[in-house]
Image (spheres, grey):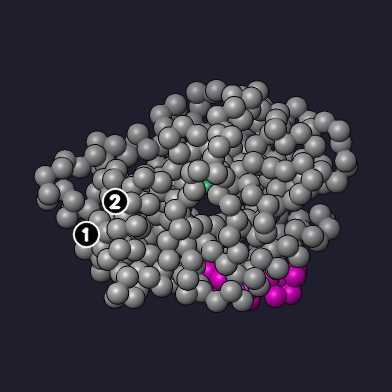
Amino acid sequence: MGLEPKNLQSSIPVPSVQELASLQLEAVPSRYIRDDMESIISTVASDNSTLRVPLIDMAKLVDSESHETELQKLHAACKEWGIFQLINHGVADESLRNMNKQTQEFFDLPLKEKKRWAQKPGSLEGYGQAFVTSEEQKLDWNDMIFLKALPIEDRNLEIWPENPPKFRESLDRYSQDMRQIAVALTRFMAMGLEIETRELCAAYEDGLYQIRMNYYPPCPQPERVTGLASHVDIPGLALLLDCGDTPGLQVLKDGRWIFVEPLDGAVVVDMGRITEILSNGLYKAPEHRAVVNKSKERRSIVTFCYPGLSFKVGPAMDLIKLGSPPLYKTVTVEEYLGCFFNPKPDVPFIDTMKI
Ligand code: OGA
Ligand code: NI
């Protein structure tokens, strides 16, 4: 590992994995082979059917009869897992199906066409691969397109695909739908934590919503690569739509990797570091990763939800009043992002936020 601080705000161009996959190679290039995969694979529990990611029903949170019981379930899910499946979230199936279809049609376009919306030097947005900072770095078996969707002023329309023709319209609608889920969920999470809800919900109303569409082609040696290497997300919430029935997302729970089984119509909610900090460490932002499949492709659409730039990220006052000392500093979302994108050499990002 180099000691220079890495600049995470741009990515070195690397080949399209989709193109590599289409060559029908017997072995994947060494740049994608992870030496540590064996140890990672061996931690996957063979009996992991007994451990399931929790399921939360938003309709039950809303209904006064079932509210209290479901709120306790949500609170436990956030504390013990940091990830859950959300059903009856109030967003029309049509919006999810539509975005799914547009994403599929986009990745199905010829490479040359997709490259019309490629990442530009110095930017992470657009079609390409995220966070490739050195020529030696191991690569993920993943192509993606990353777009800022909300607030509307943040949109860089020159890299918003115009092909397929309904892509932009669908993304516009979809991003507003994801904001609706984030705001509603935040209210219930704040209730679970017994902290003030109003300011937090307002911050998510005015929040940043950035969307990453992932494409994982089939891989001749799935056991030796990662679709997306293990990581923790940095926003408040990540809302993930699994676009089919091929499992790929895994979460680390008590030292074992557990598959998140795709569930039609559900949205997977994954806590990011901002929620961990806000809850003063009570809610955990989990390590997760994506694995790939030998014969099947997989797509996912992930919406990263942040409170607005001026919102102060720090342990909620109501939690500190109760006598537990704050474990994290308080900084604005803008400062927080500044720290993430300009990391200190060899200091894990979350440690720079700790007191
Ligand atoms: C991500 C992520 C997992 C997946 O994009 O941050 O964790 O299954 N994706 O695509
Ligand atoms: Ni993630």
Percent position of residue 166, x then y: 70, 75
Foreground pick, 336 / 275: 275
Residue 26 in the figure: left or right of residue 260 = right
Quick check: marks 2 and 1 in contact, CB under 8 Å? yes
Percent position of residue 275, x then y: 35, 51
Residue 1 occupies which quadrant of the picture? top right
Residue linked to disc 2: 278
Q: Can residue 304 be seen here? A: no
Front of the two marks 2 and 1: 1
Q: Find the distance from the CA under tag 2 to the CA under tag 1.
A: 10 Å
What is the span of residues highlighted in magenta in the rendered image? Answer: 162-175
**Residue depicted at 45% across the width and 28% down the height:** 345
171 in the magenta segment? yes
Amino acid on which disc 2 is placed: Leu
Percent position of residue 257, x then y: 53, 37
Residue 125 against residue 347 in the figure, above or below:
below
Residue 187 occupies which quadrant of the picture? bottom left
Residue linked to disc 1: 195
Amino acid on which disc 1 is placed: Ile
Percent position of residue 226, x then y: 65, 37
